[in-house]
Image (spheres, rainbow, N blue to C red):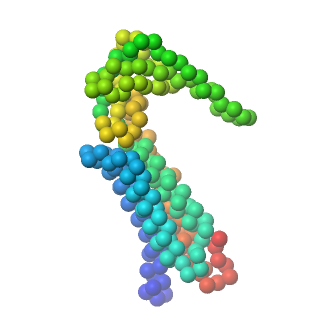
Amino acid sequence: MGKGRVLAYAGAVTVPLGSGALLHLWGSWSMRSPLGTPAALAVLVALVLAGLAVAAHHALFREGGSVLALVLLLAGLGAVWIEARDSRVRGATVECVVVGKVRVTDHPTFGEGAPEPKRLYHHALDCPGGHPREFAWERKLGGAGETVAIAYDPARRMDPVPADENVARGSLFLPGALLLLAAGLSVAALAVEGTDDRIR
């Protein structure tokens, strides 16, 4: 096996796993940065990283490689981004007073097998610093004059949540599995490149 072939195999593994790691680092840092990275900039950089990963994937193959590997690569990177966002907890908690009557709205769903209608409770709030002024949740947090604890991101990159819901929910299992499958298929595509057994 020539040196070029070894480098190609290394690249087939490094591109999905390396791009996934970089994207996770960027997603986590952009949500935790004291600089208050705007959400639009965070997404833009994430898209650039994904585009570079796709370009590197194509550069590995003379015959296009595995289409399924490319699909898994993109799905894995999307899952990494979601996981990085879900692993972030809001950095501040504020005690707010519910002002006036809590308004209730029902949001029906349609179609066979549709989920149950969603009911939202809209709370007008008086919070130190003035944020948030309104808060909607799937349960009533308190009545008029009562105090509720709200967790929020001071840089406004994430929506507020009740303080007792401010927990990290991300998991690396799904994105890791997708990126490992992408790497495996890329290696397999390289192994059969130039034969009649090309992996689609």
In this view, the residue in front, 108 or 87, is 108
Q: Residue farthest to the left?
A: 34
Question: Residue 197 location, x and y as percent?
Answer: 67, 79
Q: How many marks?
A: 0
What residue do we see at 35% from left, 33% from top? 152
Is 163 left, or right, of 109 in this rendering?
A: left
- Above or below: residue 123 compared with residue 187: above
User: Percent position (x, y) of residue 74?
Assistant: 53, 60
Is residue 174 visible to us here?
yes
Q: In this view, does 195 lie above or below 68?
A: below
x and y, in percent, of residue 17 in the image: 44, 64
Identity of the residue drawn at 58% across and 62% down: 71
Q: Residue pushed farthest bottom?
A: 2
Residue in the foreground of this view, choosing between 196 and 74? 74
- Dividing the picture into quarters, in which one does residue 10 lie? bottom left
> Is 127 drawn above or below residue 100 in the view shown?
below
The reply, left or right, for residue 42 in relation to residue 115 is left
Above-or-below relation of 37 to 123: below
The one nearer the camera, 169 or 51, is 51
Residue in the picture at 38% in, 16% down: 98
Whether residue 16 is visible, yes or no, is: no
In the rendered view, does 105 fall on the left or right side of 131? Answer: right
